[in-house]
Amino acid sequence: MLNTIVLVGRVMRPPEGWRTPAGDRACSFAVELSSTADGSGRAEAVPVVWVGPSTAAEPEVRMGDLVAVRGRLSIRAFRGSDGQRRERFEIVGDAVAALASGPPWTK
């Protein structure tokens, strides 16, 4: 089976960085996707996690940047504070590229 996803959208919140227990760099951010090509449709927020070797640079993305993300779909199951089982869908990116910086209304 093939699990590859490519997304193009705007970064919705500033990336949050941290280190994994193995010492690798990681960051998370959300990408806003529109349900239509012209951007007039309903917007969806898709969480993205990027993990790289400790020598790799984190992707240089800021809120509002237009980015392309290539990765795989990951589904994590966990128990919430209320004891309920929950699932989180996210994209684990293996390549992130900034296509344009800033929100579209600043151009």
Image: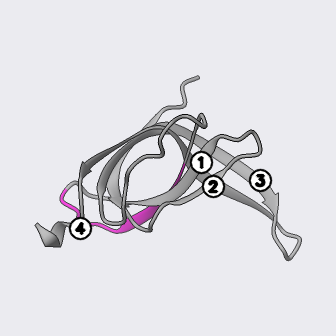
Badge 3 crowding class, 10 Å Cα cut-off, few under 14, some 14 to 19, many 20 or more, is few
* Element carrying mark 1: strand
- Snapshot quadrant of residue 97: top left
Q: Is residue 105 above or below residue 45?
A: below
Q: Which residue is mark 3?
A: 77
> Which amino acid type is marked by label 2?
Trp
Badge 4 crowding class, 10 Å Cα cut-off, few under 14, some 14 to 19, many 20 or more, is some
Tag shown at residue 26: 1
Q: How far apart are the two marked residues, 2 and 1, measured between alpha carbons?
A: 5 Å
* Element carrying mark 4: loop
Q: How far apart are the two marked residues, 4 and 3, measured between alpha carbons?
A: 34 Å
* Element carrying mark 2: strand
The reply to whether dot 2 and dot 4 touch (C-beta < 8 Å) is no
In front: mark 1 or mark 3?
Answer: 1
The reply to whether dot 2 and dot 1 touch (C-beta < 8 Å) is yes
Q: How far apart are the two marked residues, 4 and 1, measured between alpha carbons?
A: 24 Å
Identify the residue shown where x is 47% and y is 41%. 57
Tag shown at residue 83: none
- Of mark 2 and mark 3, the one earlier in the sequence is 2
Q: Which residue is mark 4?
A: 103
Could you say where residue 38 lies in the image, as x and y percent from the top left?
Answer: 18, 59
Left or right of 104 on screen, residue 95: right
> Which amino acid type is marked by label 1?
Ala
Q: Is residue 15 above or below residue 48?
A: below
Q: Which residue is mark 2?
A: 18
> Which amino acid type is marked by label 3?
Ala
Left or right of 13 on screen, residue 49: right
Task: Report the front residue among 30 and 42.
Answer: 30
